Image (spheres, rainbow, N blue to C red):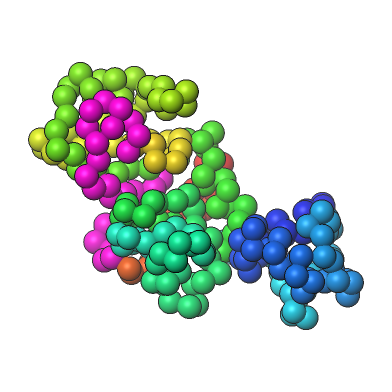
Amino acid sequence: MTTRLAKFIADTGYASRRGAEELIQSGVVSVNGKIIDTPVFFVEDGDKVCVDGHEIKKNEDIKLYAFHKPINTMTTARDPLGRKTIYDVLDKKYKNLKYIGRLDFKTTGLLLLTNNGDFARKMSLPQNHIERTYIATVNKYTKHGLDIARGGVCVDSVNYRPMKIEEIDEHNLKITVIEGKKNEIRIVLKHIGSPVKALHRISYGPIKLGNLKPEKILEIDKKTIDLILKNF
């Protein structure tokens, strides 16, 4: 089986895909003892891939973690504007974990992290129909507006799938989506006249945030991971 070199490096958890390409272009990546300086390179099973002379391998065992993302943090390894990222909050031993999907700067709550790039990709694919549930706080809403969001809308030529929406009280809504488009809930609620004041994710697939405190991280048990894998 052949794999693009940057993807192989990303799947080991050593760096993101973009970070892997930068490592390759900087001349610190070798395959079977030969320095590779172009991302347009493929490796095969059994090839020895090294970064700075140290061999890296794909993770055999999938590790999955629940992280309570605090407000005002970026879901990225590096922010060009210098804003705090999740990796500034996380302990250094978690720095090579990949995030599954993103939560924007102001959104809080459950963010999943894993050591396996392929698993992260599958968890994010819309066709796998993995539900993400949020609590959205708004100033006001109307039943007519919610019905529009429940039916699916098109905003600025982008189609957004129907949302499951439960009314908690006059300011809070429980919203479940499966697509995970960028700023999906914020865009749709603004479109129906109910701009979001606060957004908090409480579950992703079978994993719930529960009582996990902000900035804390918890490893998910293998039984839950196996359950997720069976649904791919």
Instruction: Give residue 21's position: percent from left, percent from top.
Output: 71, 60
Counting from the top left corner in percent of width and height, residue 109 is at: 31, 55
In the figure, is residue 24 to the left or right of 87?
Answer: right
- Check the picture and name the quadrant holding the C terminus: top right
Please identify the residue farthest to the left as the structure is shown.
Answer: 170
Up the image or down, 165 lies above or below 151; here it is: below
Looking at the image, which residue is at 17% across and 22% down?
Answer: 143
Residue sitting nearer the eye, 188 or 94: 188
Q: How many marks?
A: 0
Residue at the image position 45 percent from the left and 51 percent from the top = 102
**As drawn, which residue projects farthest toward the bottom?**
53
Q: Quarter of the image holding residue 115?
A: bottom right
Q: Is residue 94 visible?
A: yes
Within the magenta stretch, is there residue 147? no
Q: Nearer the viewer, residue 89 or 12?
A: 89
Q: Is residue 228 left or right of residue 70?
A: right
Q: Magenta residues?
A: 186-214
Determine if the magenta segment contains residue 199.
Answer: yes
How far across and how far down the image is residue 49, in percent?
A: 79, 70
The x, y position of residue 156, in whole percent, is 43, 25
